[in-house]
Image (cartoon, rainbow, N blue to C red):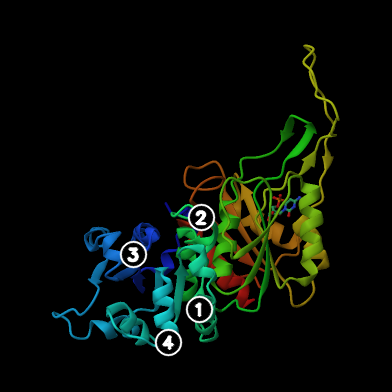
Amino acid sequence: MIPIHYQFDTFRGERVHLGVCGSVAAYKALDLTRALVQLEIQTSVTLTEAATHFVTPMAFRALGATVATASLDLANPFAHLEPGALARAVAVVPASANCLAKMAHGLADDLLSTQLLATPGPILVAPAMNPRMWNAPATQANVAILQTRGVRCIGPDPGPVACGEIGYGRLAPVEELFLEILRLLAPQDLAGQRILVTLGPTREYFDPARFWSNPSTGTMGACLAVAAALRGAEVTAVHGPIALSLPRMVRTIPVTSAQEMFAAAMDLFPAMNMALCTAAVADFRPPRQAGKYHKDGQPLTLTFTPNPDILASMGKAKTAHQRLLGFAAETEGLETAACTKLGRKNADLMAANPIGGAETGFASPTNRMVVVDRTGRQETWPTLPKTEIAWRLLTWLASL
Ligand code: C5P
């Protein structure tokens, strides 16, 4: 199941071709196909002869892909030219040592290898094989050749493989491959940009067992981090405790408290082109006691101290080449809150959303927004997936 913060509708209607080679990992290409089809990406698949011993063409067809197999397709004499001419990206998942060798040396003796030779790019390969086969000098030399030609190689990952050996040979996780394919389809308009995202809640412990926090899941920030990485940016996410996964294309720095988030984010900020402050930072922190508080029937009274405001501190420190995005989660008065916070925090763009509704705010896959920028432009957006909101906000911020 592909997480919500990886589901970008913007890729609907794109065309992707998958090559599937003979490997135990071939069944994972079904999950990948399913994820692509779910996003309404037109997916065609070619299975090698060996692949059909592990998975069936019917399974891919049932998931909504168009499928070709092994050798020549008599019904379509130009099937070997189609992916290169029609697909925006080609991915070989899993890629066998044999397939990598054929690609490196231009061999074209079955449908998939012929298609790959006739594909100008972009091509991604995700190897999966026995670790000794992967480490073999011939395979390593073949992969090096492919990389110098611009083929993107993802994985293999280390761990136990089907034959019982342990080493580099496992297929990279399907979600990572899915995102790498989306990256091949995405505009690279943020290439060269260093982007910092703060996301998730912070936890303010007042004894070793208890903390003060909020229900933020980090979804909005994760959507922004992934969208920016897909569009070519170098993304660092400073995140509080979150359950959702961030992909490898995003550098992650986990923190717990607001003070830790402040220190990590402010340390990184000078080197950044943009900072996207989505974190639900606890505004106050209680004093922390070394031992656990015990019930004695009396009320517990704690005096909270204000935490540093990360966004406002960045607003003070920012230079002419830096852009700042802030959020305002409000129960009422979105327009006013957006304008006031934009000025008070010296942000370039401020997105205000209502909290408390079913389709907005914390833990929701969608949100409703009023967005204002420092030039006075203001837009009101209907309920949209957070992925779509992230995509639009990045386009807006990059234009300022
Ligand atoms: O003032 P308020 O908390 O409503 O502002 C919300 C915005 O400020 C969000 O972008 C949030 O990430 C950021 N913020 C921050 N540090 C804080 C409090 C809020 O960066 N201590």
What residue sits right under mark 1 in the picture? 138
- Cα distance, mark 4 to mark 1? 11 Å
The extreme top residue here reads: 297
Q: Out of 244 and 317, give the one closest to the viewer.
A: 244
Decide which of tag 4 and tag 3 comes sooner along the chain. 3
Amino acid type, mark 3: Glu
Mark 2 and mark 4: span between their CA atoms?
29 Å
Which residue position is annotated with label 4?
105
Q: Quadrant of residue 70?
A: bottom left
Residue in the foreground of this view, choosing between 195 and 94: 94
Res 187 seen here: no
* Callout in the foreground (1, 3): 1
Check disc 2 and report the residue beneath it.
Answer: 165
Residue 117, percent across and down?
A: 36, 86
Which numbered disc covers residue 40?
A: 3
Of residue 233 and residue 366, the one placed in the foreground of this image is 233
Q: Secondary structure at mark 1?
A: helix
Asked if the residue under mark 2 is in contact with the one under mark 3, i.e. CB atoms within 8 Å, the reply is no
N-term mark: 2 or 1: 1
Looking at the image, residue 377 sits to the left or right of residue 128; the answer is right
| Residue 73 drawn above or below residue 4 | below
At x 51%, y 63%, the residue is: 131
- The residue located at (56%, 49%) in the rendering is 244
